[in-house]
Image: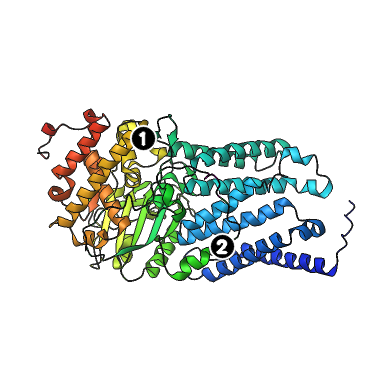
Amino acid sequence: MATEPPVAMDEGERKIVNEFCHHLEKSKQLFNGLRDLPQYGHKQWQSYFGRTFDVYTKLWKFQQQHRQVLDTKYGLKRWQIGEVASKIGQLYYHYYLRTSETNYLNEAFSFYSAIRMRAYYSKASKEERSNLTGQNLLHMPDLMVKKLRYYARFIVVCLLLKKMKLVRDLVRELSKQIDDYTGTYEPDDQMEWNLVLGEIKAFIEADNIINVVDADSSMMVLSHRLTPLNTPPQDKGAPVYLTLQEILIVGNCHEQVKFSELTLDMFRMLQTLEREPQDDLTNQIYDTSPAPGRQPMLGPQSSLENGDRTGVRDNPHKYLLYKPTFGQLNTFLASAFKELPPNGAMVLYISADGCHGNQKHTDDAAYDLGGVITNSRREGEETSKTKRASHLKEIHCLHPGDLYPYTRKPLFLIVDSSNSSAFQNVPNLFGQPLVCLLSPEQVPATMQEQQQKGSLFTLFLHCPLMALCFVCKMVDVPVALWDKCQAQVDKFVAESSRLFSRSRKLDHSYMQFFGDDFLRLILLRFVFCYIVLILHRSFKGPSYYPVSHPPLPTDEILEHPALYRIVLDLASLLDVRGLFTEPGETDIIA
């Protein structure tokens, strides 16, 4: 095949092209090196990320300043500009994953949005291929895959930012692009891309369990991150002993939908433990994406200078661990433990299938009661059905005893599993604050089929009102009614916060954690969950209720008449009062 003749360039133009090629090659080397960085720890990777951002900043500005020369003399294609923008978007997304700062999601969104609005990948489509010949045509399948990966990444960012209207548009576009790609090339990865599309659609459908509708019957999109509007009140002058600094979010539920190594429970909990991005504070309840007239910010701007380098953090640092092996989980736990500063607290949230022990009654609560399976991978020949194998414990089962070393520092444990009770007696061996919130182990038979849509306990911690509507089998809620009910939930949170502060029987661990906004919110939503379920007629018996360790005071908090009344008033507002016990059926309500 004949090559294109070289383009004549003067000395200045040749210098521009050479400098661009240098920046481009350097940026690729640094970007490819990111995957070799350790996934845990705070300091080991930051300088490398900084250098990578710096090179991409120079590359982006350089191609903007010299676009005409690069177009005519180097042959710069629009999809190549799109690739640079896509890499910068990926940098910001991965920086968000490592720092937990939600503002970096907005930066990633800006770049991904610009790629779409400016049609940088327009050449990677069926209608444009007729204009391509020779070597360019041979690159088309690879270019199409780049475009599909871009769509998948953009959808993840939009999901995390709750830009659901845009998500649905992107899913339709991705579906069309996959049809185009597979219909033209019949590629080996055809089934993989159809699986990706199916996962995205199932994830969106499963997350949409309650429709809050406006006057025009249009669905509203709710955000559930922490804002000044939903931060639970606390007594003025109340001491803050501990602040949440490290979070591990672990997911391994076999039946639960997932997308991009995020189960639905992980997706909900990570939002619950984040503050609303600053750019969205004026629009922190309902989604109006994409914002009209918003100008995409091309270039890393000054995010890094305003981020971790100042030492100021809006959000606790977190690790998202999808199906980690025991070795991986233990490594990340040890890293978070090591990084925990003085007066810092660590949250370990686990949503996983139960691994039941061999013995019902034992003196060894550390290991004989089982635990939760974090990964189903089998190793070696241990799965052979021999007499010896029957005595082996599951290698990737996290037992309560595995956590004992980490109780040397303040630990807040949340376990959502069918074997959560295994963690009911974790001893406080070192005198440090230790709280365990454990899910119900059963749900009514009518709700068991809904498990793929996420756990009920996690839903209560994520959005109490949505969980209440779910257990009452409500599907559509008018926004005016939703707002009235949300005011009742806020009333419940305020009253239960007051009861916590005034309780004389409360274990000291709770008050150590109570000064942190996130942990206070989780604790008060736990109380709401307990009271809703204990009053609901379909939930019958202790295995249907959540459990706290150390136990929360029953008379002062968990079964306080004032909290019962608020929940029952809420049920009346929703016109589902008949699903809950009558005052005369229990001696708790005055």
| Amino acid at pointer 1 | Val
Magenta part of the protein: which range? Answer: 287-294
SS under mark 1: helix
Query: Pointer 2: residues within 10 angstroms few (<14), some, or many (20+)?
Result: few
What percent of the width, then of the height, locates residue 409? 30, 67
Query: Pointer 1: residues within 10 angstroms few (<14), some, or many (20+)?
Result: some
Query: In the figure, is residue 559 to the left or right of 141?
Result: left
**Which of the 4 quarters of the picture holds residue 570?**
top left
Total count of labels: 2
| Amino acid at pointer 2 | Gln
**Which of the 4 quarters of the picture holds residue 589?**
top left
Relative to 580, does residue 434 appear above or below in the rendering?
A: below
Name the residue located 40 percent from the left edge and 58 percent from the top edge: 248
What percent of the width, then of the height, locates residue 587? 9, 38
Question: Quick check: is 220 in the magenta stretch?
Answer: no
**Which of the 4 quarters of the picture holds residue 52?**
bottom right
Query: In the figure, is residue 573 to the left or right of 153?
Result: left
Label for residue 235? Answer: none
